[in-house]
Image (cartoon, helix red, strand yellow):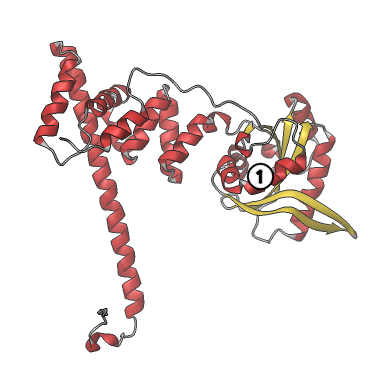
Amino acid sequence: MSVQNDPPASLAAIPAGYADWLAELKGRIHIAQQRASLAVNRELVALYWQIGRDILERQAEQGWGAKVIDRLAHDLRTAFPEMKGFSRANLMYMRAFAEAWPDEAIVQQAVGQLPWGHNLVLLTRLKNPAMRLAYAGRAIQHGWSRNVLNIHIETRLLERSGKAVTNFDERLPAPHSDLARESLKDPYRLDFLGVGQEADERAIESAIVQHITRFLLELGAGFAYVGRQVHIEVGGDDFFIDLLFYHLKLRCYVVVELKAGAFKPEHTGQLGFYLAAVDSQMKAEQDNPTIGILLCKSQNRVVAEYALRDSNKPIGVAEYQLVAALPQELQTSLPSIEQIEKELGETAE
């Protein structure tokens, strides 16, 4: 026989305004929980940095060898058996973390806002401090999970962002043009589609729809999928847009046209026609002008720049890659991510 936890009769009647007040309280509690979690994370990252700095200083000043880390790991795990993170591998990461970020202010203001696992990804996947900081900033801004951060580093997201040939500076007002330009990249990595180099436009388009979540991740933050082969009628004739998106930050529609070959100047005319039709038939009064992205198998950047000069519509031209090996991971003398995850998951004996 089950027992139901019904509210007392005296609490059954809900007074006016109670529901709104309860919702507000729940919101406050959730915010407090998030702040508490962030505070704990900042303290943990700061502690790890301080331990790493101390190891560096003592090794430099007193000539301690690497074996001291083995002893320290044993002593800390003995003293704090309920805490994870004091393995030899993680202590080595702490040392490398402090060495990578000698300025404590950066730890407090930037990377300290990220979980330790995110910092391990930055530490092991990137060597350049500026790129580490740039990816850390994007991860904080967009709330990337560790897996998403890994994907963006492996596909060189920031190195490709803003590289497409566009006429946005001439066709869009600032700062809208700057944001639009940074929203495009070159090339677009579509190797996750699983199609061969000779795939035609329809096959690529079908694969994109089947992998729309991954494609949205490749497009970047702000893109929302509207449809495929979107029908528009102009002068009694039917036309179909390959892929249509809406960008939440740019507040505009984005038309994506696929070309399974090299870029040709006449492609901009067709895309410009689609942009005009969307602006006329779909764009709301508060929306910004529709922008277009031409994804081609290859392009001559000089030809693309010339073609866009006389186009009165905002268009970007970029290449796509259907088959591309992931960049070789940067090698370090430190343990791998897999090793540290395994050790962090083990309880101290």
Q: Nearer the viewer, residue 50 or 320?
A: 320
- Relative to 214, is 30 above or below? below
Q: Nearer the viewer, residue 346 or 255?
A: 346
| Residue, disc 1 | 208
Q: Residue furthest top?
A: 63
Residue drawn where x is 54% and y is 33% of the image: 157
Q: Residues within 10 Å of mark 1 (few under 14, many from 20)?
A: many
Q: What is the x, y in percent for residue 325?
A: 58, 25
Q: Residue furthest right?
A: 236
Q: Nearer the viewer, residue 108 or 160?
A: 160
Q: What is the x, y in percent for residue 149?
A: 45, 37
- Relative to 62, is 193 above or below? below
Q: Quadrant of residue 269?
A: top right
Residue drawn where x is 70% and y is 58% of the image: 283
Q: Residue furthest front?
A: 1
Residue drawn where x is 37% and y is 36% of the image: 118
Q: What is the x, y in percent for residue 245?
A: 65, 51
The answer to whether residue 138 of the structure is visible from this angle is no
- Relative to 156, is 331 above or below? above
Quarter occupied by the N terminus: bottom left
- 36 left or right of 165 in image: left
